[in-house]
Structures are given as C-alpha cells and as structure tokens.
Image: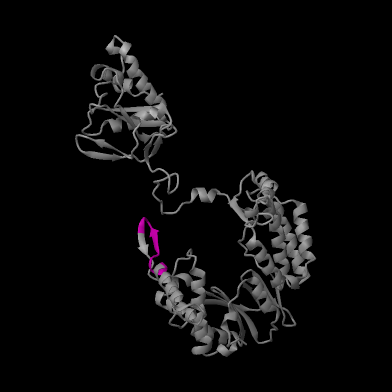
Amino acid sequence: MIHRGDLSSQAMKDTTAALNRLNDITMEDNMLLVTADVEALYTSIRHTDGLTAVKFFLETSNLPRDLSELLLKLLNFILTHNFFTFKDCFFLQTQGTAMGAACAPSYANLFLGAWERKIFLTDPIQGIERVHNWMRYIDDVLFIWQGTLEELHVFMKDLNRNTENIKLTYKAGSEMEFLDIKMKTDKEGKIKTEVFRKQTATNSLLHAESAHIPSTIKGIPVGQFLRLKRICSDELSFEQQAADLKIRFRERGYSRKNIERAYRRAKFTPRKELLCPNEEDKKLKTAREGNATRLITTYNKNWKKLTSTISKYWPILHTDKNISQLITKQPKITARRAQNLKDRLVHSHYIPEKNNPFGTKGPKWGCFPCKNCKACENIQRGDTFWDQKYKKEYKITQYISCKTSGIIYHATCPCGKIYIGLTTREFKLRVGEHIRDIENAKSEEHIESLKTLPRHFKLCHQCNPKGLVFKGIDKLFETSKRLWGRSTYQRWRSLPGERFLNEIEDLQEEVEVR
C-alpha cells in the first residue's frame, strides 16, 4: 500500500531509487503495472495553484518566514515575466512555467506533491485504496493497480476529473517502461528489470575523439556498463545488453581495451553495491573535493601541458608560509567544456549591446590614442565627432586605436575645415605620413603637385601641422576593403553641412587605400 504518512517517499530521486523500490515488490495475480504521464505539465500549472503549493511546503519547512516570503516573491516574478517569440512577435506566458527555467522542475515537483497529498490524504478519491507503491519522477508516474482493467479505467477517469488542470495518459499490463527501466513480471511475481531504449534511439554516445579530457573519455564506458549492471536484474540480460553496448562504443571510436576494461569492472561489481552506495564514502569524497583548491578553465589541446606545469611548480607556493595555509597539497584542475558547433551557430534572441570589448573597466566604443607614439599627439580621443554647420553629433560605433588598420578617419584643420580619409594600414602610420607631407611641403615649389592636406597647410598655415586633429570614425571589414572602403568613404563624405578640404578633388585620387 501507499505510505500515507509520508508522501515525500513517493517522489523518486533517480532510477536507483525506483529500482530499490521495485526489488521489494511481489506481484499478485490480480495486480497490474501502470505507468502514467502528466500531459504538458509545465505549461498546465496555473500561477495561483503553483504558488499556493510552494507556499504550503515552505510553511511546513524550517525556513525563516522572511526567507520564505522572499522566495515566493522571486518565484512570482519569474512566472509573470516569461516572454517568448513566435513569428517575430513577443508573447507573455500567462499560465505555466518555461521548461528551460532553472526552477521549473522543483516548481512542478512541489505542485504535483500538493496534488498527491490531496488525492491520498485530504480528499481521497474513490478507488485510491487499490493503488500500491505509487512512484513519481517529476511528471512520470508508476504504480501497481490491484483490480481489473475496467476498474482502472474508471479510476483514471475520476483522477483526471480535477480542478488542478492535471490530465494523465496511462498504460497498463505485465510489461511496462518507466524512465530508463523496462519491467516485466515473472512467474513468481518478481519484477525483472533491464535497460529500456526507444526503438527510435540513435547512437548518441560521446565520440572518443571529441574535445574532452582523456579521463572523461575513459570514464564514459565505465559509467554506461555500471548503469547496465545496476538496472539489469539478472546476469543473462546484462550480458545481452552489454554485447550491444560494446558494438555502439566501437562505432563511436572507443578502443577495445577501454571497452573491455569497463565491461569487466561492471561484470565483477556486485549489483547490491550499485543499488546501495556507501553514503559515508560519498560524504567523505564530497568534503575532500569541496576543500580542494580548484582551478576551473576551458579544455583545449594544451590541457596536458597545462596540468603538468601546474603540478610541477605547485610546490613552490608551499614555500611561502602564508600562502601554504590557504591552499591544499595538490590543486583540483577541472575542465570546462569548450564551445561546440551548436554554441557557435545557435544564439539567443537577446543580443547584448556590444559597448565594451575590454570588460567593465575598459574603454568603450570610439577613438582611443595610446599616447605612447608620436602620431598620438595629433589623434583625438572621443566616441563622437561633430558637424559644425548643422550642429549634429555622430556616434562612433567601433573601437579604434592608433594601431587599428582599415579605417575611415576624420581630420579637423585649425581653420575648421574637414578632411575625410581612408587607409587599410595602421592609423598611426597614415597620420604620420600626413604630418611629414605637411612639413616637407615647405621645400616644394610646385603647389599643384602637393596632395590636399599639404597644399592647404602650405597656403593657409605656413606648413605648421600644429592644431591638426585626427579621429578614427569607422572601421572597414577584413574582406573586400577596397570596394567596401570606397562606398563607406562616400557615405561619410556625403554628411550634410561639413566643409571638406577634399571636396574639389577627384575621389579616385583622394581615397588612398594603402
């Protein structure tokens, strides 16, 4: 029978918890295995019902009242601020929770826990006494029905007649599937189990050549064979499914030696140990790893060199009395998964404003001279440039320094005239050329042979570049710089109100792509 005093025992933590329950069950002739699934659970929970269920369990816990109230407010905010897009339109979800929300599984669990409490304790429905060993993992339910199939149909019909918007689909028989367990009843009434795989399942095992640390690749076969041993209730089913698993590992590039080592370990490990792990050992391991000095970084091809270098020079830190008290004997180096194709190709609808490539303390978009080179004396810092006649400000939407190559730049003469130029080389090289051309114009007798800036400064400023200010205003793409650069140059040259030094020049002569 169901344990009516403690319904928390009916919520399954994982497959192992379900297996331990199934091992103690003996089926009678008039009993059926029943599996049920709650239809669209996450999207069916009304906000008021879900919050009421969470509030009930928070009140029965030992949490302080103010913390419980804060959790309810935060949960209410999450539920009432979930937006999604469909055909380029934004919608607000008014019922249920998003499946991707971190709190969604716990929220759904508590909601169904409150519903179970109602149907078993506070307001039991007719036929509930025929239900034995009710087990649930989020929205998947397994129980044993003592009665006929027709009586089960009536019971499930009554169970679906509720005010919580819960609808269950179900199957019943002597052979059922629950989670990754396939169950069948033998002649003695014992439930035999083996691993369940859908007919449409593909070989999705991690490939042996994927970008993961070697210990992960070696550990996957061990984990999979131990899982087989844990779920398979007899040796024959273990051997049959192990043979199939070996083939699938070979298809994914794993070595025979690695596969065979994992198989032998699982074969000679008692199933009882896998079903009842030593909790003390787990606690000791958790405490030991929790106190370790941990380095977490993204895995890359130089991982072996990185770990060996850290291990080699780590003892140096222990020579310092103060540091040695803060670190452990050896660090725990953990690899974070590197980006895969999905990470690179699939992106969120939310695109943050790319305002700062150097973090919160670095420079924003604009022109930023380094102040360490001679050209920077004539390069102006700023994120905008000004149209004097029309009093209009233009924002620079790229990060440009004196070392940036491939840019459109803006030069302002002391007399107020404007020069727009283009270069594919480093900005500081082009600025330096302009300054030298102006200074060298003193000795040039033929003014017509001078370029725009030197000619202007020879006629108007006695070849003195003082007061000439440059600012990068746009960046070119890496490809097709010439074609794209000329079109962008023309766009900036067409700004209204500017008085251009080079407006009388032929565009072909003036756009200097170097």
Q: How many marks?
A: 0
The residue drawn where x is 74% and y is 81% is: 187
The image shows residue 189, relative to residue 37, as above or below, that is below
The percent position of residue 412, horizontal first and vertical second, equals: 28, 29
The percent position of residue 96, horizontal first and vertical second, equals: 43, 71
The quarter of the rendered structure image containing the N terminus is: bottom right
The image shows residue 448, relative to residue 122, as above or below, that is above
Q: Report if residue 70 is visible in the image.
A: yes
Closest to the observer, 233 or 56: 56
The percent position of residue 97, horizontal first and vertical second, equals: 44, 69
Task: Give the residue at the far left of this rendering.
Answer: 389
Closest to the observer, 224 or 241: 224
The percent position of residue 455, horizontal first and vertical second, equals: 28, 17
Closest to the observer, 469 or 172: 469
The image shows residue 192, relative to residue 102, as above or below, that is below
Q: Is residue 167 magenta?
A: no
Q: Quadrant of residue 164?
A: bottom left
The image shows residue 358, relative to residue 103, as above or below, that is above
Coloring scheme used: one colour
The residue drawn where x is 52% and y is 51% is: 343
Q: Report if residue 487 is visible in the image.
A: no
Apparent side of residue 204 relative to residue 345 in the rendered image (left or right) = right
Apparent side of residue 157 relative to residue 191 in the rendered image (left or right) = left
The quarter of the rendered structure image containing the C terminus is: top left
Which residue range is magenta in the image?
78-89
Task: Give the residue at the far top of this rendering.
Answer: 445
